[in-house]
């Protein structure tokens, strides 16, 4: 079976998601640095666990170090000189990194992975029989109208009516109702509405 044809990329929302990813990467690395100030030097395995489990991992590690196991958590934190406010504030204020994929470098720094599962939602394909049929039909309309325009058989003033008649499978490129405008496949329309 052949690969579905890419119809349209939602560039606006993809760019917005890429900006959020940059903020998430920055927030994750700030969180790891703050965790390191609390726990001390971290291995890459610990960094990965902190990325996944966030504050729960840090609290569990601190609990193992409690000097007074029978005392309250707050008392133990005070006696250890530990304050988790900065970590909690980073979690509250920062962008969540959970939905993104990161690679951990040898230097202990997280960078965004090249492949992001989150980005797939912004790529729209002709992945159904209906979308494939619509795309095929729209390409035929585009070619037929282009050929008719070359031969002088098209009234440019009526092109918007043709577009409307085909329920947005094709759209006007150029100034509607003016010489030089033409019908083209409406990839976004087919992706969004079929």
Image: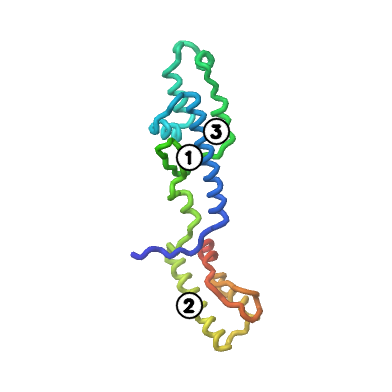
Name the disc covering residue 91, or none: 3
Q: Secondary structure at mark 1?
A: loop
Mark earlier in primary sequence (2, 1): 1
Instruction: Please state which of residues 33 and 70 is positioned toward the viewer in this rendering.
Output: 33
Q: Position of residue 143 (x, y in %)?
A: 50, 79
Instruction: Please state which of residues 60 and 110 is positioned toward the viewer in this rendering.
Output: 110
Marks 1 and 3, how far apart at CA: 11 Å
**Residue drawn at point x = 52 percent, y = 45 percent:** 21
Q: Secondary structure at mark 2?
A: helix
**Residue drawn at point x = 53 percent, y = 81 percent:** 146
Residue designated by label 2: 140
Contact between labelled residues 1 and 2, with CB atoms less than 8 Å apart: no
Question: From the viewer's perspective, is the residue at label 2 or at label 3 nearer?
Answer: 3
Q: Position of residue 77 (x, y in %)?
A: 51, 17
Contact between labelled residues 3 and 1, with CB atoms less than 8 Å apart: no
Mark 3: few/some/many CA within 10 Å (<14, 14-19, 20+) = some
Q: Position of residue 137 (x, y in %)?
A: 47, 74
Question: From the viewer's perspective, is the residue at label 2 or at label 1 nearer?
Answer: 1
Marks 2 and 1, how far apart at CA: 44 Å
Mark earlier in primary sequence (2, 3): 3
Q: Position of residue 194 (x, y in %)?
A: 50, 64
Name the disc covering residue 141, or none: none
Left of 176 or right of it: where is 36?
left
Marks 2 and 3, how far apart at CA: 53 Å
**Residue drawn at point x = 46 percent, y = 24 percent:** 39
Depicted 99 relative to depicted 146: above or below: above
Residue designated by label 1: 98
Residue 150 falls in which quadrant of the image? Answer: bottom right
The N terminus - image quarter:
bottom left
């Amino acid at each position: 079976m052949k690969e579905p044809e890419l119809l349209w990329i939602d560039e606006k929302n993809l760019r917005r998601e890429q900006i959020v990813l940059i903020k998430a990467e920055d927030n994750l690395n700030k969180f790891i640095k703050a965790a390191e100030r609390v726990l001390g030097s971290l291995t890459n395995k610990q960094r990965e666990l902190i990325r996944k489990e966030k504050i729960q991992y840090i609290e569990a590690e601190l609990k193992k170090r409690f000097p007074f196991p029978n005392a309250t958590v707050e008392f133990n934190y005070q006696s250890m000189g530990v304050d988790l406010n900065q970590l909690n504030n980073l979690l509250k204020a920062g962008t969540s990194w959970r939905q993104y994929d990161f690679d951990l470098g040898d230097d202990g720094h997280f960078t965004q992975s090249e492949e992001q599962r989150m980005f797939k939602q912004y790529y729209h394909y002709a992945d159904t029989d209906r979308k494939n049929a619509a795309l095929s039909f729209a390409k035929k309309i585009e070619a037929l109208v282009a050929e008719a325009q070359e031969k002088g058989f098209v009234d440019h003033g009526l092109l918007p009516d043709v577009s409307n008649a085909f329920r947005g499978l094709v759209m006007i490129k150029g100034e509607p109702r003016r010489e030089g405008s033409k019908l083209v496949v409406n990839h976004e329309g087919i992706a969004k509405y079929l």
